[in-house]
Image (spheres, rainbow, N blue to C red):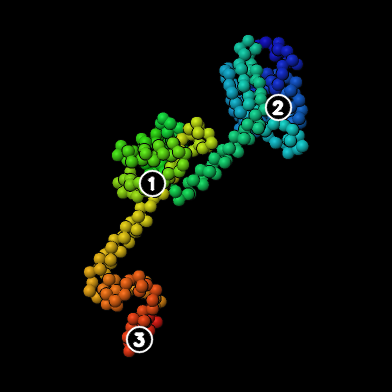
Amino acid sequence: MRHPDALPWDQIPGLSAALGQGASLLRASRAFQELHRAFGGPADWTDWLAETSRSWLNANLQSHADFHLLLELTSSGSSAAMRTPGWLTCNAHWVPTLGHHICHFADTTGVERARLQAQALAERIRLIFKHLPVMVAHFGPRPHNRCEFANQQFAELFGHDEHSIVGAPALGLISTKLRDAVVPFLRRTLREHVPVTFPFDFISVKGEPLRLEVTVTFAGDPRHAGVDKGFFYLITDITERHKTEFALRESEDRLSRFMNASEEGVIFHRDGLVTDANPSASRLLETPIHLLLGRSVLDMVPPEFRARAEAVIASG
């Protein structure tokens, strides 16, 4: 093995070192030596490293091959910690003629902190979307509009999970018939860059008929019309509300048919004031229905029955 002094270490810029087995420090550049002193100059320079990073480095140094590692450094808890990096990227090259690795280090603390912050933010956003009472997904730019993100509720609607749905094209998730119904709304969103909301009848993967309310929103900045960033889907399951509204309409229709067909006068009131009446009541009282609304029902009761009517109204 040739001696590491074969390299002009005093002239090598940046953080560089010759490392032997067990991460033994054979030689180092001036910048590396200064960093070593900033950490207090420990006998074993790997005392800088977090336990996991130290293990990874030692394992890779045992192989006669190049490698690339992200190393986390320890915090000394002193004022020196404010001047030392938190992470170093190690690019190591095995040099057969020297019989050891030459390692070049770069301070990537800022990049790694930004990555961890972005990762934490992404996790918070994922948790928010996970607990939202709405199905949400983002599909990328044309021509395929592939899924880039979907919360669990959205993914399950189409028989996927949060991971398997990623990469699926938007129109590939639905049948040809439904595709023909949806495409005009998508085109309008992408053309006009405005949110579009529409009802959507859908059969779930479990075979259940669903009534959905779909909002498609352009994902880009309307001021940058030439930039296609795809669109967002926001889907709300309105099946139960739709069933309730349908049942209410049917009930109202049946009541309306009954009132129109009945020969008896029927008046509806709240707190003694008329809220509705059927045509027969209008004929019997010789008063148009719109003039009956808001009047006191007691005005329509003969004087001899008024006390009884008041008692009935008071009883609820």
First-in-chain label (2 vs 3): 2
First-in-chain label (1 vs 3): 1
The span from disc 1 to disc 2 (Cα, nearest Å) is: 64 Å
Name the kind of residue labelled 2 in the image: Trp
Please determine whether, in this image, residue 275 is positioned above or below residue 37.
below
The span from disc 1 to disc 3 (Cα, nearest Å) is: 53 Å
Q: Percent position (x, y) of residue 261?
A: 22, 69
Which structural element holds mark 2?
A: helix
Residue designated by label 3: 306
Residue 45 - label: 2
Q: Residues within 10 Å of mark 2 (few under 14, many from 20)?
A: some
The span from disc 2 to disc 3 (Cα, nearest Å) is: 103 Å
Q: Percent position (x, y) of residue 130?
A: 48, 46
Which structural element holds mark 1?
A: strand
Please determine whether, in this image, residue 270 is positioned above or below residue 250.
below
Q: Percent position (x, y) of residue 140?
A: 46, 34
Of tags 2 and 3, the one toward the viewer is 3
Check the picture and name the quadrant holding the C terminus.
bottom left
